[in-house]
Amino acid sequence: MQSPALPVPEAPSLVPPALRGILPLLIAIPTLALFHWSLTGSDFATYLLSVVGVNIILAVSLNIVNGMTGQFSIGHAGFMAVGAYIAGYTSLQLKEVALSFLPVSASDQVLFMLALLVGGVAAALCGFLVGLPSLRLRGDYLAIVTLGFGEIIRVFVQNTDAFGRALGLSGIPQYSSPGMVFFWVFLVVLAARRLAGSSHGRSLWAIREDEVAAEAMGVDTTGYKVRSFVFSSFFAGIAGGLFAHFVPIINPGSFTFVRSMEIVVMVVLGGLGSTTGAVVAAIFLTLLPEGMRSLFGALGTEGSLAQRVDQIRMPIYGLLLVVLMLSRPQGLFGTKEIWDVLPRWLPRKRRGLA
Amino acid sequence: MAQLLQHLINGLAAGTIYALVALGYTMVYGVLKLINFAHGDVMMVGVYMGYATAFAIGREARGSFLGIAAVFAVAMLGCALFGFLIERFAYRPLREKPRLTALITAIGISFALSYGFQLDIGFLPGASPRAFPEIIEPKEWIIIGDRDVVVWNWQVISFLIAVGLMVGLQYLVFGTRFGRAMRAVSWDHRVAALMGIPTDRVIALTFMLSSGLAAGAGLLYAIKDTSVSPLMGLYVGLKAFVAAVIGGIGHVPGAVVGALVLGLVEEFVVGYAASTWRDAVAFGFLILVLLVKPGGLFGRVAAEKV
């Protein structure tokens, strides 16, 4: 895997320095608001959009661990499950509560935000508990321990009455909307990009390139690895919380190893270390099965073919990983971002990490 | 007291099976410094080979000694060949690449196998578990008291087969030229190559050996469980990995001890707590071991050098 491009001296920017910090927010909030109000389409479009958004959050957050830090977690669905169950449970408990000084919808959204944060923090806590022992050692252990962690979560949920055992939780208020999901997409992408350019992020890149050398340079490798893992788990928990608030029911079957692998494939396909790559791959891999399904449906061949898309998808994901590693281990973009690989005649962002 | 003895016997019987799989992880890790994620799924493929053989030779031949031998031989040899192919075409091209690429490849193979076998296209068996033919007809061999303690014939046979395979392995690793080459490669594969050891061949043979052993263990597990399913590799493989880590990965006798410990712990959890928690115990145990003694019982954490 090639090393990230070296930063070049900053080019003069059009944006005054005072605005630079909050500029993304200034652009994103009106855009998201427009997006939110213009969306009155079908239920299915809303649902699909939300799923795309959740997958982007998952892929971008996993990329922080698997891409930037060079560790390999394959239990992201486990953290998503923690977030989904804790946030869903919180919302169920707060169902009767309303903040009387706010209009009903605003009060719902405030409570929803609260539930999301509770879920995210719970997932981050689990990330710490799982990451600390395994990240003290070499990265391979993380892969197995995260896989085992997913199993523990599943067994735990199936044995806990409060979480509905194997039946799952239903009746969680449907607070979520594509606007809210994409607000978090915006936050995670911003956080990941800012992290990649920060000194903290540079330590992560150093660990990824050569852990021994990074340690020799004085990087506290375990500390940085655990922090990046906790950070990533937090956003996985948020994604889970969002997911719990727009699907009718969550059960242990929604958060299996298959789900984790889907996210891993997105990150590897996009390029380990490329945030925009993860976004592109997440969109592509979420819409592809839907597209295939409707294509087969429209062709009117045996209905079984359309139903089997999901089944056939999984071994193909496995083979895709193998083929990618053998032929193009850097994925679509490697560690570059999408604006680094666009054709020359398009205006480019200045080169470098930031 | 009798109950305790019964649990001890069951735990040891399960532990010896885990040990055979754990040895595969440990040997491959020894020569390649790779956690062979697909090990459990290669085992699963081997079990299906044995399953097909058991049906091919028919009900009559199945119970006879020759029939059992044929099932084990086909599964173990076929699986060894399969392990060789995976090593040759998926791992060897990545030998000099960063370690992460090999790990991702292994995860990809594992996923492709365990979910590929769930399809029901062509020869693939489909997702639902199938009953494994009783190649060893269950009989109670030893009964103590009023059925307080029961030892089944398959427990004894599988214990003997497992111990036999382990003794053979011990001789192979410490008593033959190949074993010496293997240990040299695991010590330092570059220097071993300079000393004239054909490292590629040694690594390929190690893979074949570990896959063959895994197929044998998988068959014993299928006999115990009386079923085969595409996902069995994932579960047995994970537990065997935990066993290998408990003993200290890369340490051959450690893997056996770790597997016996894990088998006993699982059996006691099922016996005295709740059986639904069985699958979570192994991983809780793994995290505990990594926290307290990351090198495992016998291994030590070696500082990585450049």
Image: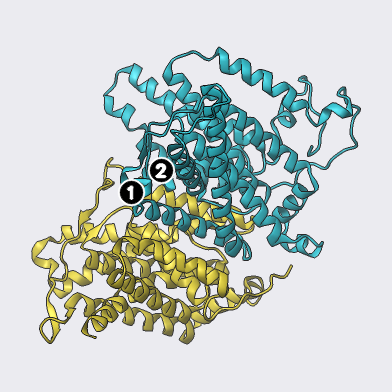
Chain colours: A cyan, B yellow
- The residue that mark 2 highlights is A315
Q: Residue A245 placed where, x, y %?
A: 46, 32
In this rendering, the answer to whether B63 lies above or below A286 is: below
Q: CA distance from mark 2 to mark 1?
A: 29 Å
Nearest to the observer: residue B304 or residue B105: B304
Q: Residue A301 placed where, x, y %?
A: 29, 21
Number of numbered tags placed on the structure image: 2
Q: Are marks 2 and 1 on the same chain?
A: yes
Q: Amino acid at mark 2?
A: Pro
Q: Which of the numbered marks, if any, corresponds to residue A79?
A: none
Quadrant of the image for the N terminus of chain B? bottom left
Q: Left or right of A99: which side holds B49?
A: left
Q: Chain of mark 1?
A: A
Secondary structure at badge 1 equals helix
Q: Left or right of B244: which side holds A333?
A: right
**Hey, which residue is sitting farthest front in the picture?**
A100
Residue at screen point 80% across, 32% down = A21
In this rendering, the answer to whether B283 lies above or below A99 is: below
Residue at screen point 62% across, 71% down = B189
- The residue that mark 1 highlights is A165
- Regarding residue B42, the answer to whether it shows in the image is no
In this rendering, the answer to whether B251 lies above or below B133 is: below
Q: Quadrant of residue A28?
A: top right
Nearest to the observer: residue A260 or residue A351: A260
Quadrant of the image for the C terminus of chain B? bottom right
Of callouts 2 and 1, which one flags the residue occurring earlier in the amino acid sequence? 1
Residue at screen point 53% across, 33% down = A112
Q: Judge depth for marks 2 and 1 and give the one in front.
A: 1
Residue at screen point 27% across, 57% down = B48
In this rendering, the answer to whether A227 lies above or below A13 is: below
